């Protein structure tokens, strides 16, 4: 008599190493997301071929058999992501070498970099960690505009809550689109493509200790709508033009002109989110006489048109005039 084949669903093992300060919302949120995916799979498919199984592992634990997926979660407290983590990095390297898809969220990218897994790759992390990441790993390709950088064997996610985008992406690798769509509807998560730069805020460095540059920064914050030449800005700082360019970038990470653009765009975001002004009015209010130039600059830096930004982040009202613009 021929033996019956095993019809039990295949287990897709997902390991989440935990470090001190790891975001509990991400760890348990991922458990819930994959658990909900399992429930929906069983509802839509009487005999699903595969189900997800999540394991939480202390970072210094003895490596288990390589999982299909490993996710280094975000770290909200402390600086464990900056500290040397030899056991975890060794485990990640071993797993990756044996076929595990290694992923990170937010500060977790630092651990993938420390493990040497991001050499020659593009990655993302939280936009507020960009300066620290570039300081520790200046040779790596970092794209903090992206919310998710997916490759076949490595996936990095940007913001703290990007674990949801990562989770949906990983589910989509193993199940039909109908399951992902049902999961998104149940969790009330946007399953469409997003970018981290949609959410990026301009937070200028003001504690660098260069008084001449700080004096110019204060001046630009007060008069950002005015056109200002490099010569005028150098005079305000009391520096020569070449010295200004060098010291301003050293102190803030931007050239003076770029800094001024960031100030204008940040104010434009705030106006679009909180006021009823038309796009033309917003452009004028932040120093752009040419609305077309404003729109192009806004798209370049945010990935959205002014109208799309208002629709996504605004307070639910329409502009006073010509609501279709943007």
Image (cartoon, rainbow, N blue to C red):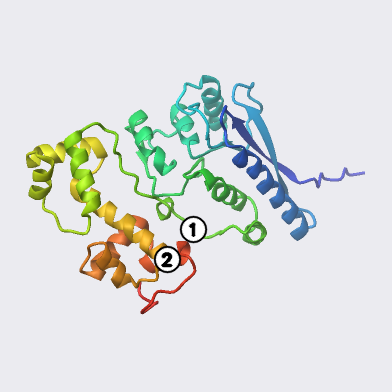
Picture quarter with the N terminus? top right
Q: Position of residue 75 (x, y in %)?
A: 53, 34
Q: Is residue 309 visible?
A: no
Residue marked by disc 2: 310
Q: Is residue 219 above or below residue 205?
A: below
Q: Quadrant of residue 283?
A: bottom left
Q: Nearer the viewer, residue 193 or 299?
A: 299
Crowdedness near tag 2: few (<14), some (14–19) or many (≥20) residues, C-alpha within 10 Å: many
Say what secondary structure mark 1 lies in. loop
Q: Nearer the viewer, residue 14 or 231?
A: 231
Give residue 154's mark.
none
Number of marks drawn: 2
Say what secondary structure mark 2 lies in. helix
Q: Is residue 46 visible?
A: yes
Q: Position of residue 273 (x, y in %)?
A: 42, 63
Q: Nearer the viewer, residue 317 or 258?
A: 317
Give residue 193's mark.
1
Q: Residue at x 24, y 31 (%)?
A: 209
Q: Is residue 71 left or right of residue 5?
A: left
Given this view, does label 1 or label 2 mark the residue nearer the observer? Answer: 2
Q: Is residue 268 left or right of residue 194?
A: left
Q: CA distance from mark 1 to mark 2?
A: 17 Å
Q: Residue at x 8, y 44 (%)?
A: 235
Q: Quadrant of residue 215?
A: top left
Q: Residue at x 19, y 39 (%)?
A: 213
Looking at this view, name the residue that lies furthest to the bottom: 322
Q: Residue at x 36, y 57 (%)?
A: 302
Q: Is residue 282 left or right of residue 68?
A: left
* Dot 1 or dot 2, earlier in sequence: 1
Contact flag, marks 1 and 2 (Cβ < 8 Å): no
Q: Is residue 204 left or right of residue 274?
A: left
Picture quarter with the C terminus? bottom left
């Amino acid at each position: 008599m021929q033996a019956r084949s095993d019809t039990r669903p295949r287990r897709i093992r997902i390991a989440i190493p935990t470090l001190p300060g790891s975001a509990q919302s991400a760890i348990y949120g991922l458990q819930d997301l994959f658990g909900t995916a399992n429930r929906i799979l069983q509802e839509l498919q009487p005999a699903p071929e595969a189900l997800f199984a999540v394991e939480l592992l202390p970072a210094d634990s003895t490596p288990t058999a390589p999982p299909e997926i490993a996710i280094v979660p975000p770290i909200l407290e402390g600086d464990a992501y900056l500290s040397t983590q030899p056991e975890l990095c060794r485990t990640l390297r071993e797993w990756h070498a044996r076929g595990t898809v290694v992923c990170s969220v937010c500060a977790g990218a630092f651990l993938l970099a420390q493990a040497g897994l991001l050499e020659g790759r593009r990655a993302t992390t939280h936009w507020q960690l960009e300066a620290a990441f570039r300081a520790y790993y200046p040779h790596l390709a970092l794209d903090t505009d992206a919310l998710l950088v997916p490759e076949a064997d490595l996936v990095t996610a940007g913001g703290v809550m990007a674990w949801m985008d990562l989770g949906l992406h990983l589910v989509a690798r193993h199940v039909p689109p109908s399951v992902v769509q049902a999961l998104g509807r149940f969790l009330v998560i946007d399953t469409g493509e997003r970018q981290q730069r949609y959410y990026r805020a301009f937070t200028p460095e003001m504690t660098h200790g260069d008084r001449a540059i700080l004096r110019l920064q204060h001046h630009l914050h007060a008069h950002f709508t005015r056109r200002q030449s490099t010569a005028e800005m150098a005079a305000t700082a009391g520096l020569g033009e070449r010295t200004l360019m060098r010291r301003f970038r050293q102190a803030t990470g931007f050239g003076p002109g770029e800094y001024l653009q960031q100030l204008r765009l940040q104010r434009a975001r705030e106006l679009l989110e909180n006021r009823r002004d038309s796009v033309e009015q917003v452009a004028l209010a932040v120093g752009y006489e040419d609305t077309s130039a404003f729109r192009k600059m806004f798209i370049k830096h945010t990935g959205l048109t002014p109208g799309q930004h208002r629709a996504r982040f605004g307070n639910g009202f329409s502009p006073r005039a010509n609501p279709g613009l943007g």
